[in-house]
Image (cartoon, rainbow, N blue to C red):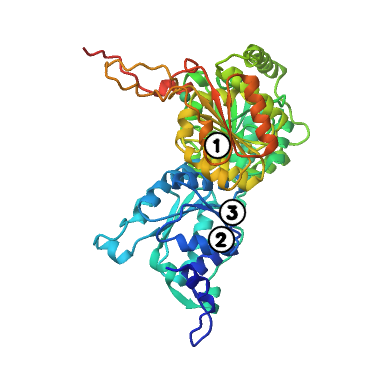
Amino acid sequence: MDVSSNLEVSDQKNEAGLLTDGFHLLIDALKLNNVQTIYGVPGIPITDFGRLAQAAGIRVLSFRHEQNAGNAAAIAGYLTKKPGICLTVSAPGFLNGLTSLAHATTNCWPMILISGSSEREVVDLMQGDYEEMDQLAIAKPLCKAAYRILHAKDIGIGVARAIRAAVSGRPGGVYLDIPGSLLGQVMDEVEGKKTLVKVIDPAPDQLPSPTSIVRALKTIENAKRPLIVLGKGAAYAQEDELVREFVEKSGIPFLPMSMAKGLLPDTHEQCAGAARSLVLKDSDVVIMIGARLNWLLSHGKGKSWGEPHSTKFVQIDIEPKEMDSNVEIVAPIVGDIGSCLSALVNTMGEGWKKPSVEWVDAIKAKKDTNIARMTSKLQNNNSPMDYEGALGAIKNIIKNRPNSILVNEGANTLDFARSIIDMYQPRKRLDVGTWGVMGIGMGSAIAAAVETGEAVLAVEGDSAFGFSGMEVETICRYNLPVCIVVFNNNGIYRGTDINVSGTKDVATTVFVENSRYDKMMEAFGGIGENATNPDELAQAINRAMDSGKPTLINAVIDPHAGKESGNIGNLNPQSIVSRK
Ligand code: ADP
Ligand code: MG
């Protein structure tokens, strides 16, 4: 279809008046609901849609692979509390986008995957259409809701449903199926306009019951060693001042989950991040705020929780079904974080008793020991670098540039960075989320730069980077202030594995030795740097962040540094059987 014909369609008339079509109605519906950016990959049948959306003032960013566009949309949802929009072509493009849709859903982030699809009549009779696939059925189990729009007059309501499903209650991913023929359907412009729906109050407040507040405060009051766990749901809620008020008024030590780091500064005196094992093991009452008792917290039970000693849980969550998901929640508070925290703060009263000095001092002593033990390691200037030296340099950079957004993925690169780099502001740390998925790096970096306008520093394992590395072209194309640091240790986990079979292939976890990832960035007009020690690394990052130019720094890491699967090696089964 020729774009000029579509641009002109609204000037065409029938007897009743001006005409519109599916393309324009979809654009108008998105704009009416304040969608400003679309992340996607053009192709059949949505190429013209992208062009027209761009012409209509929506920012349409084209990626090199749908998964990265989808990861961008997912993190845009997290950062803005509005659904991030990903646009894909039918079947294969749709499937490529699905990983990120499922990722958004798993992480409770609002996102809408809009995918073009082939013709219903042909698909349903399995007559072999171009890119034939029953996309709606496939998407359903992987997202919060899935809808298909068949008639132009339903576009307004379809978009409204998608937005509401994505952001209300527990946010998540929504699939919106757009058969190619829908886009070309024509209707009267005035009638079409009447079908559009502006979603009023898409994520209504959900007030907790007063009983649940009183029950929770009683439980907390009776605690000897209370702990607050802040999760990325609390960061998502953007109720930063209320979180601070509750934490400081209660005086209870807090532990931030990975992406909740910076909600309050990691250097806050109540932050127990550097005494994580101790507080999990010894606390007797734990207040979960927008965090789940999933694998990342050992499901709330077992050795790391000090069993057989029993921990009582208070939990704030917007999703009632989250309560008792892994262990008993003695005081569930169901509601949105803002409403729940303000009810708690207002009911606490002036005479609130803060936790005992013994508990606070025990945590402080542990923190001080752990921090002191790390400090000298973080200052080494070894070449090739180890994780501590390289990340020690980056820790200082984030301290001096607390507005910057840190994107982080990898195995060791992730685990070391999470514990070494302090965060100071909310929603500045974007990482692999609930699944621990690799490949979020470039999509997250791009969306972070686009949505916030801040400089982005992406700290990437060499393997993790490979999943989305082609998007360096996208970063250069849109000239985004993104500095990528590839922790290059020649392989997955490490670069030292041996192939014991005697064949000439390298081991399964080994990459090309001494590669120069920086050259990839240079290929597209960005800046490439090679850093062999922490001083060089710091200088190169500072140069990049001062200039705001797309930069990739190849950071030469000792192939022997790090360990298999980083901190979660225990999840990786290993054979103990030896065969001759
Ligand atoms: P983390 O990985 O940091 O522990 P999770 O993603 O596991 O965080 O948990 C986030 C939780 O926050 C989810 O259970 C989700 O339902 C909840 N949540 C998200 N937004 C809100 C909100 N506005 N109010 C209350 N709970 C929320
Ligand atoms: Mg590696």
Q: Viewer-proximal residue, 3 or 389?
A: 3
Label 2 CB, ligand 1: below 8 Å?
no
Q: What residue type is labelled 2?
A: Gln
Residue identified by numbered label 3: 203
Would you call the spot at circle 3 few (<14 residues within 10 Å), some (14-19), or many (20 or more)?
some
Q: Which residue lies furthest to the left in this view?
A: 580
Residue 192, image x and y in percent?
A: 52, 75
Cα separation between marks 1 and 3: 44 Å
As drawn, 269 above or below 194: above
Q: What residue type is labelled 1?
A: Glu
Would you call the spot at circle 2 few (<14 residues within 10 Å), some (14-19), or many (20 or more)?
some
As drawn, 267 above or below 477: above
Q: Viewer-proximal residue, 416 or 442?
A: 442
Query: Does residue 559 appear anywhere in the picture?
Result: yes
Q: Residue 148, located in which quarter of the rendered image?
A: bottom left
- Say whether marks 3 and 2 touch (CB < 8 Å): no
Which residue is drawn at the image coordinates 45% and 75% (left, top)?
186
Label 3 CB, ligand 1: below 8 Å?
yes
Which residue is drawn at the image coordinates 50% and 31% (left, top)?
517
Residue identified by numbered label 2: 54
Residue identified by numbered label 1: 522
Which of the image's four quarters has the N terminus?
Answer: bottom left
Q: What residue type is labelled 3?
A: Ala
* Local SS, label 1: helix
As drawn, 23 above or below 560: below
Q: Viewer-proximal residue, 534 or 310?
A: 534
Cα separation between marks 2 and 1: 28 Å
- Say whether marks 1 and 3 touch (CB < 8 Å): no
- Say whether marks 2 and 1 touch (CB < 8 Å): no
Labels 1 and 3: the sequence-earlier one? 3
